[in-house]
Image: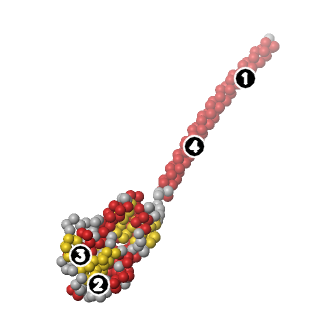
Amino acid sequence: MKKKLAFIMAAALTVSALLAGCGNSGGTQDAADTDGAAEDAAGTDGAADAADDTAGAADDAAADGVQEAETGAEEPSGEKVVLKCVCDLTPHSEILGAARDALAAEGIELNFVSTTWDATWNDMLIDGEVDFAYFMHVPAMESIEEEMGATLYSMGGIHVEPYTCFSSKYAAKEELPENAVIAIPNDASNEYRALKVLEAEGYLKLKPEITAANASVNEIEEYLIPIEIVEMDQANIIPSAADFDAYFVNANRALEAGIDTSFYLMREGEDSEYANIITVTEANKDNEYIKTMVKILQSDDVKNFITEHYNGAVIPAK
């Protein structure tokens, strides 16, 4: 009986231990579950932190991108252009010189390839050796186009040199003797101007069909006052001025030669249509730098320089 009772008590203790073990096992799982939840929560917080970090990095990158966009904005290049030209020394290069500061402010510099006229100037312009020419008026340009089979463009008139008759012997046209010998240039456009002045002053009558393209003494219908006209290359007129009673030249030729242009016998009116122009070829007719230069040359500042500097021998173009 004692043995049986001892067996029963041992069994009860075993069952109790087993039940306790089961209870502990559940508690461990709950703890594990709790720990896992904590880890999950920690993981969630970490993900949030990572997301925050990512967002912050993105914001920083965006900010950097804006900064790059702002600092990378294109600044004015400050680029300068050099325009090559042929022009007469007086007054053309002087007028261009008067505009030098205003041109420089627009990034334009000038290179005077030549300021001593010769027949190669036309070739230099047409062949593209220079960007523009500043020595002719529209009738002269049209004559060159016809003669050389070229297409030229006027970018605008800058000044007028009233075509003028001078004398190294007489102070007034009334002093000219009968059959006075008068030299005029033999290029059609300038000869036309000289003949038109002589007609306006009552020395002759021209044929109705005369033009700036065909002008010559052959287009004189009759002489009203006896004079002898000598046609010659304009470049040779002033050096041989002493051989004539009077002579016609452009005012700029007279200025270059040091002739006092306030003493003259006769000249074109100030409404002359023969403005000296900036001339270009097809390659430069849309050149923005040249367009800007023309605007500057037609400005009030440059017009005032012309008016004040040349005392009527050169006048601003209208």
Please tell me which residue lies in front, 43 or 136.
136
Marks 3 and 1 sit apart, C-alpha to C-alpha, by 142 Å
Circle 4 sits in a helix, a strand or a loop, which is it?
helix
- The three-letter amino acid code for the residue at tag 3 is Val
- The three-letter amino acid code for the residue at tag 1 is Ala
Q: Which residue is mark 4?
A: 50
Locate residue 122, reporting x and y percent.
40, 66
Outermost residue on the top side: it is: 1
Which residue lies at the image location 36% right of the left edge and 70% below the top edge? 135
Which residue lies at the image location 75% right of the left edge and 17% below the top edge? 11
Q: Which residue is mark 3?
A: 197
Q: Nearer the viewer, mark 4 or mark 3?
A: 3
Please tell me which residue lies in front, 157 or 184.
184
- The three-letter amino acid code for the residue at tag 2 is Asp
Q: Which mark is residue 17?
A: 1
Q: Nearer the viewer, mark 3 or mark 1?
A: 3
- The three-letter amino acid code for the residue at tag 4 is Ala
User: For the N terminus, which image quadrant?
Assistant: top right
User: How crowded is the residue under tag 3: few (<14 C-alpha within 10 Å), some, or many (20+)?
Assistant: many
Q: Nearer the viewer, mark 3 or mark 2?
A: 2
Q: Which mark is residue 245?
A: 2
Earlier sequence position, callout 1 versus callout 4: 1
Marks 4 and 3 sit apart, C-alpha to C-alpha, by 94 Å
Quadrant of res 150: bottom left
